[in-house]
Image: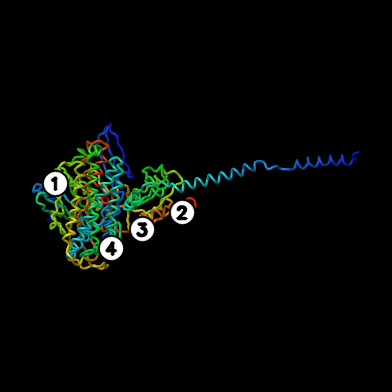
Amino acid sequence: MLTKINVGPIHPSTHGVLRLVVTLDGDTIVNVEPHIGFLHRGVEKLAENRMYMQNESYMEKIDYAAPMAYSDLYVAALEEAMGIQTKERAKYVRLILLEFQRIASHLLWLGTFCNDLGQMFTMFMWTMKDRDLILNLLQDVTGSRMFYVNMRLGGVSIDLPPNFEEHAKKLLDYLEKRLKEYEVYLEKNPIFIERTKNVGTLKRNDAIELGVTGPVLRASGVNFDVRRDYSYYVYDKLHFIPQVQTRGDVFARYRVRMLEMRESIKLIRDALKSMPEGDALGMPVKLISPPVKESEVKVRRELPRGEGMIFMVADKQRPYRLSIRAPAFINLSSLRQIAIGERYADLFAILGSLDLVMADVDR
Amino acid sequence: MKIEKDNLLDKLREARKGGFDYLVKITAVDYLDHLEVIYFLRNMSNKKEENIRVEIKNGDALPSIVEIYKAADFYERELSEMFGIEILGRKINRLLLEKWDGIDAPLRKSFVWGSAYKSD
Amino acid sequence: MMDDKFINAKKEMEQLVVDSLKTYKAPTGAFFTNLKKATKAIANGTVKWSRKNSLWPMQFGLACCAMELMDFGSARIDAERKGYLLFRGTPRQCDVMIVAGWVTKAVAPEIKRLYEQMAKPGYVIAYGECAVSGGPWWESYNIIKGIDQILPVDVYVAGCPPKPENLFEALMKLQEKVGGKVED
């Protein structure tokens, strides 16, 4: 006897608005069908009707947990289309701010994941407090808490303030201590271990065939990271190492993200040491942008959720077609194959470990 | 590289055997008298990339490539809904605008941005 | 020796007293009606005071403004110190619905149903530009321009996204609307 359960659109555990129709046989899952589109607003069509520099603030609202990463992806596509080089000091400044953004996004994931597993509300409170400290540091640099819009053609809009280095070093020491506390709190907890080990396994061949990206791919044993393979900014000078685990279950995805946070702390320290002096300001914002030299461009970046790509066909003053590859979209489509055969209570652990943001899925 | 619509399935099988095992995205561009559909592929072992372009007229139908690449499922559904291209061999087509039946192929150039809100 | 007119006068006086007693209306239960009015006023005031000081919000974060709602409820910007505790998942236990994020045509019937499930009197706050008037996506084919096309809204908060401190002021204005002045 098969029963169908509707996990409705507005639910405290789905991150955003997502509807799942689950077919059960007793307690085991037989089929999962996601219905999406509750947050679709047509960003790709909107981008064709605005000029180049007006589009930057719309790109940030696609993924609201790490907005600076999408705005950096879009401005990099514009720079390649107009033939503008990024200044040397600006590469280091952008790298530092993006790695802080990555730590903030992973801390948010950790808080809501522990909330899904059974109301471990303590972790939510602790990680949101740490994330707030990072956002205050970014507010000192750019002026805004959440939607920064600080990337310009060729650099950034405002350089780092003079006392940034000591504030950042104090914050990094504090964060390292806190990460060690989180690991002790979670990995010696028998409830956490039983709920996450050997649950939702994804093997290496399936991961490549289903097209998943980001920490989900690296937790299944595939050694691929855009920061090392198609390197940009100064990642190759700072000796970056991708973190890979081989088991492929929910615990491995958790482990990859914790190790990535430590790697980001190490990268920021190295970049602060070897940053050159100079000028990091980009061109000021004008409605008429410089002339376009190449008409078709393709740019890739490593967003906190996976690999993002923009393919743009450029017209004179506005894009003719802007096609965005969102990492959460393709990660959601692998939910069906992972969840078949598991129990119903494990569905939310698997959904939480994929790290979805629904506005990224629907665009 | 640019190929004809009839060789599409053979060319993709050949690419799959040649080591391109990861599908990155399927997208389309609307030039006003024809459409261009692009398949982005990648080889995971030596990190090389390849783009395969197909040109189709308005009203043509494309074959479905789900047997060759499993990741093409959601991309094909989004493509057929946003551009109005018919894809043969699929049962379910609508993905993002499931509950709203009044909008047809919004990403084409014939759908003017801002035309739907005056009737609200 | 008593005269005759004095006996008559005594009888007349007694008759006068009896007659005036007939037309005299004693105030029956005046004490009790005043007591009833006084208790009604105290009870209304108490009910208003308790409704005003314990607003329980329902979490309704749809999009980016939900990040600021999560910050509003957590440790640094604390919502519990002013009494807005316990963001609940079910509408049966809440008074205030804070709508944060843009509303599309697919979600709109669900929001209407949730508003009707909330026990009356219930209030609605529109948080952020997208719930006030459609926001940056006002020309889109899939968006409802403002939540006040479906629900009756009490307080509007502008910003993209508004800082969580603005939500404090909005809730204090709602408290004044519910019943009387609020001291900080």
Residue A222's disc is: 1
Assess disc 1: are there few (<14), some (14-19) or many (≥20) residues with their C-alpha within 10 Å of its C-alpha: many
Residue depth check, mark 4 versus mark 3: number of the one nearer the observer: 3
From the viewer's side, name the closer residue of C146 and B116.
Answer: C146
Is residue A52 in view? no
Helix, strand or loop at label 1? It is: loop
Q: Is residue C166 left or right of residue A263?
A: right
Separation of marks 2 and 1 at Cα, in angstroms: 60 Å
From the viewer's side, name the closer residue of A263 and A295.
Answer: A263
Helix, strand or loop at label 3? It is: loop
Separation of marks 3 and 1 at Cα, in angstroms: 43 Å
Q: According to the image, label 2 marks what residue?
A: C183
Separation of marks 4 and 3 at Cα, in angstroms: 19 Å
First in sequence, mark 4 or 1: give its number.
4
The amino acid sitting under disc 3 is: Gly
Helix, strand or loop at label 4? It is: loop
Q: Which residue is pictured at 90% across the width and 39% down the height?
A: C2
Residue C159's disc is: 3
The amino acid sitting under disc 2 is: Glu
Disc 3 chain ID = C
Assess disc 4: are there few (<14), some (14-19) or many (≥20) residues with their C-alpha within 10 Å of its C-alpha: some
Separation of marks 2 and 4 at Cα, in angstroms: 44 Å
The verdict on a common chain for dots 2 and 4 is no
Q: According to the image, label 4 marks what residue?
A: A54
Residue depth check, mark 2 versus mark 4: number of the one nearer the observer: 2
The amino acid sitting under disc 4 is: Gln
